[in-house]
Amino acid sequence: MRSPWFSKLFLIFGPRLPRNWLLLCLICILVVIALFGSSPSSAFDSVASTAEPQIYTNYRRLKERAASDYLELRSLSSGATSPREFSLCGRDRENYVPCYNVSGNLLAGFKDGEEFDRHCEAYQEQQNCLVRPPKDYKIPIKWPIGRDVIWSGNVKITKDQFLSSGSMTKRLMLLEENQIAFHSEDGLIYDGVKDYSRQIAEMIGLGSDTEFFQAGVRTVLDIGCGFGSFGAHLLSLKLMAICIAAYELTGGQVQLALERGLPATIGSFISKQLPYPSLSFDMVHCAQCGIPWEKKDGMFLIEVDRLLKPGGYFVLTSPAIQQHGSSLTTKKGSMFKPIEEFTKKLCWSLLSQQDDTFIWQKTMDAYCYISGKQNAIPPCKDGQDGQSYYQPLVPCISGTSSKRWIPIQNRSSGSVLSTAELEVHGVRTDDFFEDLQNWKSMLRNYWSLLTPLIFSDHPKRPGDEDPLPPHNMIRNVMDMNAHYGGLNAAFLEAKKSVWVMNVVPIGTHNTLPLILNQGFAGVLHDWCEPFPTYPRTYDMLHANGLLSHLMSEGCSMRNLFLEMDRILRPEGWVVVSDKMGPIEKARSLAAQMRWEARVIDLQNGSDQRLLLCQKPFLRK
Ligand SMILES: *[C@@H]1O[C@H](CO)[C@@H](O)[C@H](O)[C@H]1NC(C)=O
Ligand SMILES: *[C@@H]1O[C@H](CO)[C@@H](O)[C@H](O)[C@H]1NC(C)=O
Ligand SMILES: *[C@@H]1O[C@H](CO)[C@@H](O)[C@H](O)[C@H]1NC(C)=O
């Protein structure tokens, strides 16, 4: 269990308890009054009748004081001027993901897979309610055990999906009635992921999969990741694997991966580009991921090419290919033939094929596309290669004229970026390292503030255990305005076992390539829209300067906070850092969300403030 001490503390100091205590006291007093004050057949009758007026006035005074304390507490917790708290949504919204409404999309005429795409145009009927946890929801199990065992009540999965979970990336087991177990390091459940990873390493010419990092493979996009076991293995090799899969009504691969504490977002590229710039990943992996690669004039492969860095790898494992022909000289009607033709036009070379796994390498030579060799697909004209935020798929090659066209094999071997590498991203070395230094001290501040005691009006009682800092209570972190990824770097430096989803808001300097180059997870996002993830998938949300930015963009702060509440798990944390004005507004919204909130003055003479919040575990 994550933090039993914490639950205990919450029981003792629970911020909602003072009210209940007062009510309880009130009831006790009423009972006492009833017993002693008005019992006609009491032995104390004669005494009581003379004492009655005094008791009555005392009682009234007590009652009045209790009532005024109660009102004061209420106004304190909800903000005197703010509107009412939001109510909980209906049970039908427990797994609500805005912008993904399959039945609605079908009605609107989307088909051929596009019904699973993100359609935020239809996201108008915003309901002002808080998405509630399922009845059997439990706080996730601590990392690293939580990677291999999750509560089945926390995810939406059906019995049938258990039974059909035979393929390698989807192997799992029901341990006990309310738990799901995945691969475990001790080999309790054999899922073949380690052998598979070793096979891929050998196929690209490495001795073993521990050499991926040295060979320049740091970030992997795992399309249709099953339940994330391959990614979990890559993480253990110090690689960053981001799982991406289309929205699913039940058995969501992204929901399960996040529940295990593995990086994942909802995403599909049926008609629109993924929200990553060109030249983002070192490897794109698909094991039975369900993408019809041979269809749509190779557009899906062109999108993979856009995402891959020069010299990067595309790994495709598909028994469907093998069934129709296991060698290059395939039979008619196979799906391999069209794929093979497209990959030639993309200037990819087939490195190796074993069983049903194929590995292609993207060219390191941008000239390949220009020279017109192999009927290559032409490079995009200027403007077609801009900030790719759900732009339509394009039938041209992106990134060939970018300063970032650097083969992954030319990477510096260390994990720290060199001055030259920073220069490519238009960032000065001084700025970068000053920012990092700043975040190291900020993180220390956050960590010391993130103890539950600060959310209590009660002092620590004698005999209580000292609460430990919340180690391991936080695994999935989102930095909603990540800048250079400094918070992520500070977390790693402090050896916290977290991963950070570094979100680069559109309309700010696009630092996402720099973030990914450090081996971090990240994504572009417009915070005026909902984030593509399932409810309750993050343990902590952090936003530095985001509110000021969004106020200038003119989007609804209330919608943003409702969205933050949706993606934050019960008892999760929010840290907002901004100027006093936006923080005041945020505090009143936090009260509407029913979060416990504290504003902290950094006491350094600036009007910068911190807002620390904790989402309560609301069951009813
Ligand atoms: C999905 O769309 C349908 C049809 O437009 C609508 O009736 C339904 O309420 C929508 N569901 C959600 C969860 O928004
Ligand atoms: C990558 O390294 C190779 C070999 O060291 C070198 O020839 C090539 O110019 C480098 N490419 C870039 C873009 O730096
Ligand atoms: C106060 O601290 C914040 C956070 O570290 C920082 O951004 C700000 O520049 C500081 N202000 C002054 C006047 O030092």
Image: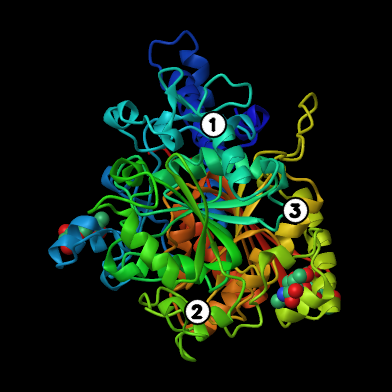
Q: Is residue 65 visible?
A: no
Residue drawn at (27%, 50%) of the image: 331
Q: Secondary structure at mark 2?
A: loop
Given this view, does label 1 or label 3 mark the residue nearer the observer?
3
Mark 1: few, some, or many residues within 10 Å (few <14, many ≥20)? some
Colour mapping: rainbow
Please give the residue where the numbered disc 3 appears in the rendered image: 214
Q: Looking at the rendered structure, which numbered label has been put on residue 398?
A: 2
Quadrant assignment for the N terminus: top right
Q: Amino acid at mark 2?
A: Ser
Mark before the other along the chain sequence, 2 or 3: 3
Give the x, y percent position of residue 418.
Answer: 82, 70
> SS of the residue at dot 3?
loop
How much space separates mark 1 and mark 3, taking CA atoms?
Answer: 66 Å
Q: Is residue 43 above or below residue 617?
A: above
Q: Residue furthest top?
A: 43
- Marking on residue 110: none
Query: For numbered disc 1, what is the local secondary structure?
Result: helix
Q: What type is the residue that disc 1 sits on?
A: Cys
Residue 136 x, y percent position in the rendering: 40, 30
- How packed is label 2: few (under 14 Cα within 10 Å), some, or many (20 or more)? many
* Percent of width and height locating residue 408: 67, 65
Residue at the image position 59 percent from the left and 62 percent from the top: 312
Residue labelled with disc 1: 25
In the displayed structure image, the side of residue 297 where residue 585 appears, left or right: right
> Who is closer to the viewer here, 70 or 269?
269
Question: What's under tag 3, amino acid-wise?
Answer: Gln
Counting residues from the start of the chain, the first of labels 2 and 1 encountered is 1
| Up/down of 468 relative to 269, above or below | above
Residue nearer the viewer, 465 or 285: 285
